[in-house]
Image (tube, rainbow, N blue to C red):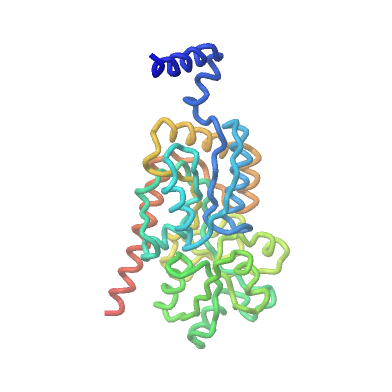
């Protein structure tokens, strides 16, 4: 009899609670949701995560602390999320740089291990040089690289990334440069200004402060069309280059094992947040505004990008034969 009394008493106590309190554990979310920024403080992924957290908190009604887990091109943070319960309380930034690294063999994760809530930022990458650089146009940059193979140093986010792929593509055309990777975003952004490197491959939002203050000059946008906010900057297609399919996108994602009903709650919140004037102003200011698309289209963008990088790597391999 004694063994039955505690459960009965507990049930009786639960029955005395108001309905809202009894349902609290069943309602999602009922506690803070952690966003893992997969790169260090001050970088594009970190700033995106913090701004999105601010906008999402108003919709989900719970705190959304951001935790930086940098390392291994984003793999450290994403591995942490996969190691956490798939209950919607662990969200991560999954960005193009990381997906490219996977395709290049950095880490053992794959796109299908995640559910993409949304592609929240998207931008073509560009090449920037200091304002006082002797290379004032992309053609001058190319001419120097061709005449001085291996002397031009370009700051990038790492090997196996779209930065690396683009430089390898240019090398295949006879414009050989040196990839100088930086794990710390702030160090990468300032490297050409301190003369540690000659140029930087980056998306414009991450170096907006340097561009707006005219410390950096934009040489080219790697796309088939000119950027609407940089109308005087030529695109790579104008140089007969086919390197427009490596955009720098950022997503918010969860484990693929997350229940559909929880994914739906998070997706609707992110969709709503992306239409918030505060978010739109931030995205446009960082040159990364993109309209919301459904989960399946967002997932397809990630998978297609992964396949595209694989295709480049296979092509580089075949060209060596």
Picture layout, residue 243 above or below residue 305? below
Task: Farthest residue to the bottom: give it.
Answer: 147
Provide residue 202's location: percent of width, then percent of height: 56, 64
Residue 23 falls left or right of residue 216: left
Frontmost residue, 32 versus 273: 32
**Which residue does the image show at 39% across and 60% down from the upper left?**
102
Task: Farthest residue to the left: give it.
Answer: 321
**Which residue does the image show at 52% across and 31% down from the upper left?**
29
Frontmost residue, 226 versus 90: 90
Quadrant of the frame with the C terminus:
bottom left
Quadrant of the frame with the N terminus:
top left
Task: Farthest residue to the right: give it.
Answer: 213
Provide residue 60's location: percent of width, then percent of height: 57, 32
Task: Farthest residue to the front: give it.
Answer: 2
Frontmost residue, 131 versus 310: 310
Picture layout, residue 295 above or below residue 226? above
Provide residue 83's location: percent of width, then percent of height: 42, 48
Residue 299 falls left or right of residue 204: left
What is the tally of numbered marks visible in this picture? Answer: 0
Frontmost residue, 134 versus 18: 18
Provide residue 40's location: percent of width, then percent of height: 58, 59
């Amino acid at each position: 009899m004694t063994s039955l009394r505690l459960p009965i008493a507990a049930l009786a106590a639960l029955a005395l609670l108001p309905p809202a309190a009894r349902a609290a554990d069943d309602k999602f979310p009922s506690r803070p949701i952690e966003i893992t920024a997969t790169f260090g403080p001050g970088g594009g992924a970190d700033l995106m995560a913090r701004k999105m957290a601010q906008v999402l908190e108003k919709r989900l009604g719970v705190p959304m602390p951001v935790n930086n887990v940098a390392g291994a091109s984003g793999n450290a943070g994403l591995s942490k999320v996969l190691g956490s319960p798939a209950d919607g309380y662990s969200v991560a930034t999954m960005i193009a740089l990381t997906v490219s690294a996977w395709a290049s063999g950095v880490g053992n994760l794959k796109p299908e291990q995640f559910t993409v809530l949304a592609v929240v930022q998207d931008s073509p990458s560009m090449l920037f040089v200091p304002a006082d650089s002797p290379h004032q146009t992309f053609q001058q940059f190319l001419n120097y690289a061709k005449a001085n193979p291996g002397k031009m140093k370009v700051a990038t986010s790492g090997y196996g990334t779209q930065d690396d792929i683009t430089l390898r593509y240019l090398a295949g055309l006879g414009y050989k440069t040196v990839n100088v990777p930086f794990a710390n975003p702030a160090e990468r952004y300032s490297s050409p200004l301190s003369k540690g490197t000659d140029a930087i491959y980056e998306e414009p939002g991450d170096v907006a402060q340097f561009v707006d203050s005219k410390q950096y000059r934009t040489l080219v946008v790697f796309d088939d069309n000119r950027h609407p906010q940089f109308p005087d900057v030529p695109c790579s297609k104008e140089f007969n280059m086919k390197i427009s399919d490596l955009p720098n996108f950022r997503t918010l994602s969860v484990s693929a094992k997350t229940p559909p009903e929880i994914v739906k709650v998070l997706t609707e919140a992110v969709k709503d947040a992306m239409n918030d004037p505060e978010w739109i102003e931030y995205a446009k200011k960082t040159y990364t505004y993109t309209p919301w698309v459904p989960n399946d289209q967002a997932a397809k963008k990630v998978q297609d990008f992964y396949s595209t990088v694989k295709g480049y790597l296979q092509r580089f391999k075949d060209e060596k034969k």
